[in-house]
Image (cartoon, grey):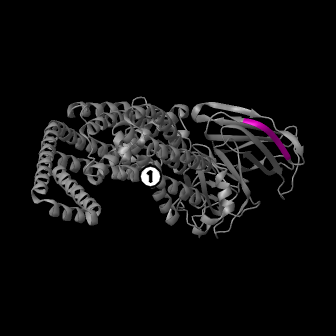
Amino acid sequence: MTQTTAPRVRTLVLLFLAAACALLAGAGPASAHAALTGSDPRQGAVVDRAPAQVSLTFSESVSMDDDSVRVLDPKGKRVDDGGPTGTGGTTYAVKLHAGLPDGTYTVTYQVVSADSHPVAGAYTFSVGAPSETSVSATAQAAGGGFIGGLYGVGRYVSYAGFAVLVGGAAFVLACWPRGAGVRVVQRFVVSGWLALTAATLLLLLLRGSYTGSGKVADVFDLGLLGEVLQTKTGAALVSRLLLLAAAALFVAVLFGAYDKREDEERRDLTFGLAVGGTVVAAGLAATWAMSEHASVGLQAGLAMPVDVVHLIAVATWFGGLAALLVALYRGPADTPVPTDAVRRFSAVAFGSVVALVVTGTYQSWRQLGSWTAFTDTRYGQLLLAKIALVAVLVGIAYFSRRWTARLADTAAVVVRQRGKARGEREKAGAKASGDSKGSGNAKGTGASKGSGNAKGSGGPQRAAQLARQRAAVDAARQKRQRDADPHRFALRRSVLAEAGVAVVLLAVTTVLTQTEPGRTQEEATAAGASSTAPSAPSTGAVTLDMPFDTGGQDGKGLVRVELDPARVGANDLHLYVEGPDGTAVDVPEVKVALTQEAKDIGPLPVAPDHITTGHWSASGVQIPVAGDWEVAVTVRTSDIDQVTVSKNAQIG
C-alpha cells in the first residue's frame, strides 16, 4: 500500500491499540464452527443399565445423514439402530439395540456445522463396568487428507482470484483509467476472473467428499453432487458462478467500450461501471458471508454485511496493490504508471485499512470472547499472526508513501527533460530534411531521377522498417530512463515487499476461516473437562436393590427402585417387590421418600400407584437439585408389621 494521506506511525500504533482494546470489550457469546457441548451418556460415564439411545448436543445447528453417528461395541461392531433423529436443531439422538451386554462402547460422529465446516469426534462410555475395546476413541479427521488439502488450496485460490478481480478493476476505475488500455493490466484482471471461476467449480465438485468420506472417487459421484446442491454451501457456490457471469460482462465493458471512449465520455461511463461493479463485488462477497462463520451465531444479521465490507476492503487493498505491482514491473515503457495514479491508490488503500480495522475488530469480538483465547486456542494464535502481518504491511506502506512523495517531486523534472529531448529531436529532423532538399537541387536531374527510382522500388518498406526501429529505440530509451529513476525503483521494491507480505497474509486468513473459533474451542474444552471429571455424576436410570425384613410372617423380601433418567427435573419411578424366592409379591402398602441432607431438602414423599402384582409406579417425580440423595422405602406387610430401608444414589 502506498499512502500519501496515511497517518504517521504514532497514529497507526494508537489505532491498533484502540482496536485491540475494543476487541474484548464486553465480549459476549457467539457461535460458529459447531462443537460437541454435551452427550447422554456422557464421555467416560459408567451406567448401570444399557441406555436405549445415545444423544449428542452441539453448540449450533448441524446437518447429518444416516451414517453421521455410529455406536460401536468393544469388538467394533455397530450397535446403533437407524439414523439420527433431531430434537431442536442442536441435539440429535440415535437408538441402540436392546439388551446390550456390559462393556465399553465408542461413539463416533461426523457432521457439518451451520458455518459449512465438517466436525468430527469420538468418545466412550461403559455399561456396568469398563472393559477392553478394539476401537480407537481418537477423534476422526474431518475434512483432512488429500481431498481436504485440495479443498484448502481451492479456497485460497478463490480468495486470491476475488482479490485480483475486484481490486484490479477498482484500481483501473478509481486510480488509473488509462490502465484499461494496458495489455498487462487487462490480462491480470482476467486471470483473477478465471482463477475464481475455476476454484469455485473445484470446490463444488470436492464439497461432497470433503464433508463425507474424503475419497477421491466421491468427487465424481453425481448423486453426491446433487445432495451438495441442496445445501447452503452448494447454493452459495452456484450463486457465485452466476455472479461471475455478470462479472465477465463488466470486465468486457471495462476493457472494451470504456477503453475506447474519450475522456468526457469515459467519465460518464465510469459512474455506471462503478455502481455495477460494486453490486457484483458485494454479491460475490456475500456468497462467503452467507454460508460461513458470519451466517451463524450472535448478531448474524449484522455480521454478514460487516463480512461483505471486510472482504471488499481486503480485495481492494490486496488486488489494487498487485495491479500496481504488475504495472510497475511489466507495464509498457511508453505508458508508465503516473504519479497521480499512485497517489490516488494511496488514498483508496488507506480507506481500505480503516475498514479492515473496524470490521476485523467486530469479527474478532464475535469469535474470541476472552483474552485467554488469544494464546490458548489455535484460532487466537492465528489471529495474532494475522495482526502482526498487517502491522508489518502497514510499516512497509509507510516507506512506500515516502517514495511516492519523492516520485511526485521529480515528476515535473522528468516531464521537462522529455519535452526538451523531443524538441531537440524535432529540430534535428527539420535540419536533416533541409539538407536533403538542398542536396537534391544541387545534384541535378539525373541524380534526382535515380534517387526517385530507388525510393520507388524500396522506399515504403524501408520507411516502415526504420519507423519500427526508431520506435524500439525510443521504447528502450524510455524504459532505461524510467528504470534509472531511483525513486521509482525504490517504489517498485517496496510495493513488491508489500505484495509478498500480502500473499502470506492471505494464506493465514484462509487457514483462519477454516479454524474452529476460540470461543467455541474453549466451550468444548470446558464441556469435555466437566464430563470427564471424577465428581461428575453418571447418567441413565438408577437401580437400587434393598432387602427388607418386617419381622412378621412372610415379612422378608427384596424391594427394587428404578429412577429414570435420574436427573434434575421430572423422573419416572418404578418399584418392584419380590419374595425370598424371587417371585413378585404384593404387599398392603409401600411408600417412598427422597432426602438430600447436604442441602437440607426433604423428605420429599412419593406415593406410587399399584400397577400389577409386585409393581408400583409414579411419573413426574421432581428432583430439584443434583447431588447425593437418600432413597427411603417403607414396606408394610401386615397391619402391624412394617420397616423402612434406604440407600443413597447420585442423581443429576
Q: Is residue 454 left or right of residue 138?
A: left
- Give residue 547's position: percent from left, percent from top: 75, 51
- For numbered disc 1, what is the local secondary structure? helix
Point out the image quarter for the N terminus. top left
Q: Is residue 324 left or right of residue 650?
A: left
Q: Quadrant of residue 591?
A: top right
- Give residue 12's position: percent from left, percent from top: 25, 33
Q: Which residues are magenta?
A: 615-621
Q: Please tell me whether the stretch drawn in magenta is mainly helix, strand or loop.
A: strand
User: Would residue 260 be counted in the magenta stretch?
Assistant: no
Q: Which residue is mark 1?
A: 190
Q: Is residue 560 left or right of residue 17?
A: right
The amino acid type, in three-letter code, at marker 1 is Val
Is residue 160 visible to us here? yes
> 607 and 68: which one is in front?
68
User: Would residue 616 be counted in the magenta stretch?
Assistant: yes
